[in-house]
Structure formats: structure tokens, C-alpha cells
Amino acid sequence: MPDKIAIEKGSVQETLIIPLYGRKLCAEVFPQLYTDPSAARICERLDYDFSELDKQAQSTFWRFGALEAAMRQLDMQWEIRDYLVTHPRAAVVNMGCGLDQTGRACDNGSCRIYNVDMPDIIAAREELSPAGEREVNIASDLNGFGWMDEVDGSEGAIFFAAGVFYYFTEVQARALLNELAMRFPGSRVVFDTVGKLGKRLMRSTFKSFGMENYDECLYVEDVEALRGWVPGAMVSARGYMLGYYPMDDPAVTGLHRFLARLCDGPVKMRIVRFDL
Ligand SMILES: C[S@@+](CC[C@H](N)C(=O)[O-])C[C@H]1O[C@@H](n2cnc3c(N)ncnc32)[C@H](O)[C@@H]1O
């Protein structure tokens, strides 16, 4: 058995554990809705104490958390596959990829897959699942734009970020989008956001990951406010939980559906899309 890979406790990088574990749990509990063999395999290879998460895995709320992680990935996959219909050789770029394999899940045999994250995460990723054919792992802070030099967007590009824009200030998010617009005209960018209430609800979780500047970070109360961010871009948004798929699985309960409507409603959890 190869050595286990350590994930540093109390770091921003540790935040990748929650969606990863959520995808593993979702694939176990809601198999008709979501499959993700890589999540379980990767969890097994991590030197991380999952016992607390395992204990809570039976609860309705944790199962709903798992649904959140999986629905977001399904939403991203919808957007990627949709873009690949018209740009089959596009760059598929996972910004703040963690240990997620969405690029591979959408591989059409001709696209190019890029995974960008901080150096320690990319190092762990390389050990757990080294870059395959037509795949490049890039160790970089997303806010230093040099990483974009490595992306070949000559046949289109779709950039997606799952659970990542919460770490950016509005200034950083706008700068990133404008840089992508300048370098990759015709590309698509997809990311998830929450409104003011959602941000308040997530506060203690993010603070526990040592995120000092949480109060300054992005939330989107009104999608209309994003329209002026990138000149000439088209902006649209859909509900995060129910905006793409109806969440069909026999194990999805009435309470889960109620919570999903709350998330897409007052909590304003959304998948935002910029067509640049
Ligand atoms: C909540 S995790 C989500 C991981 C992955 N997208 C998923 O769905 O499993 C957030 C990820 O964003 C990465 N991240 C946050 N800020 C970043 C930045 N400025 N540059 C690169 N990666 C960043 C973290 O290292 C972490 O892997």
C-alpha cells in the first residue's frame, strides 16, 4: 500500500476535505443521483481523521451537505459538457481543483484538462492521481495570473471553480474574470456563490479553517450587480440545488427537498456563469 498523504489541519487546503467527503457520502447514499468512484478511493489514501465526519454521516443534515457537494459537481459537469458540444477540443480548467476529478468525468477524448491549486494540493494530487494524457496540473495561486500562460485556450476554454470564489474578495474576483476575458475571449467561467444570509451561515465553518479575511470575501445578493463586472460579458445564474437537475433519488427525503428550496431561495446559493 503506498504511503498516505497528509492534509494540514486548520488550513484553507483542508476545506477540500468537506466536498470530497460529501461526494463520497453522496455516491454511497444517493447512488441513482450521483456516482464518484474517485472520491472514495482518494479518501482512503489521505492521512486525515475522518472519524468525526463518519459519525455525523447518518444525520439528515450531513446527508444534505453531501447532496450539496454532489449537486454542485453535477451542475459544473452540465456546464462543461454543454460547452464541449460546440468546443470539443477546449481547455477544461478546474480552478481551485482540490482533489476533485470533474475534468476527467467530462473527458470527451479530445479536450485538454487543467487542474489549478496551491502547490501543496497539487503535490498531493500528483501522488494520488498523476496527470493523465491531455491533462496538466498547475501549482499556483489563482490570483497570480501567470498560471494562465500554461492554458492552451486556442480552441475554446471553460473555467470552473467549485467552492472557491468564497475565498476571493470582490476585487480579486473581478480582476480574475477580467484577465480571463482578455486572454480567452469566447470562453465560459462558472462558479458558485451565496447571498448575504448564506455567507452569515457559513461564517463559523470558514473561520474554523483559519480564514482571517472572511468578512471581506465575496457574496452575491443580486446577480444583476455582476452585469457590469466584465464589459461585454453575458451573465446568467441558476439555482445551485435544483437549477440543473431535479435531485431524483429514492433516498432524497421531503426535508432534503425543502432545504434545497431554501438554499436556492433565501440563502441564494447559485451557479453563476460568465460568457466572455
Ligand atoms: C472548498 S475547496 C474545493 C475543492 C474542489 N473544487 C472541490 O470541489 O472538491 C477550495 C479549494 O480552493 C483552493 N483555493 C482557495 N484559494 C485559492 C487560490 N487563491 N489559488 C488556488 N487555489 C485556491 C484550496 O486550496 C482548495 O483546494
Image: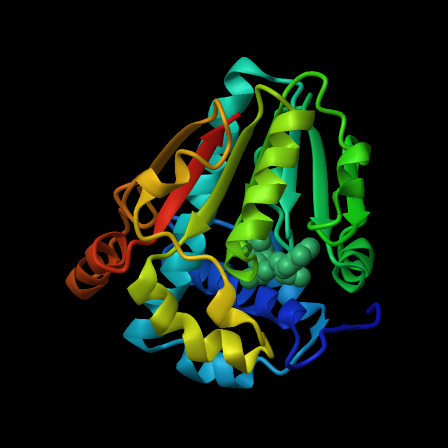
Q: Residue 28 sits in which quadrant?
A: bottom left
Q: Which residue is found at the position 34% from the left and 72% from the top?
A: 201
Residue 156, percent from left and from top: 63, 20
Q: Is residue 274 visible?
A: yes
Q: Nearer the viewer, residue 168 or 204?
A: 168
| 234 left or right of 101 in image | left
Q: Which residue is found at the position 41% from the left and 81% from the top?
A: 56
Q: Which residue is found at the position 48% from the left and 49% from the top?
A: 35
Residue 46, percent from left and from top: 70, 71
Q: Residue 62 sits in which quadrant?
A: bottom left
Residue 162, percent from left and from top: 52, 51
Figure quadrant, ligand 1: bottom right
Q: Nearer the viewer, residue 29 or 168?
A: 168
Q: Is residue 41 visible?
A: no
Q: In which quarter of the image is the N terminus?
A: bottom right
| 272 left or right of 114 in image | left
| 245 left or right of 96 in image | left
Residue 270, percent from left and from top: 35, 48
Above-or-below relation of 151 to 34: above
Q: Which residue is found at the position 47% from the left and 64% from the top?
A: 22
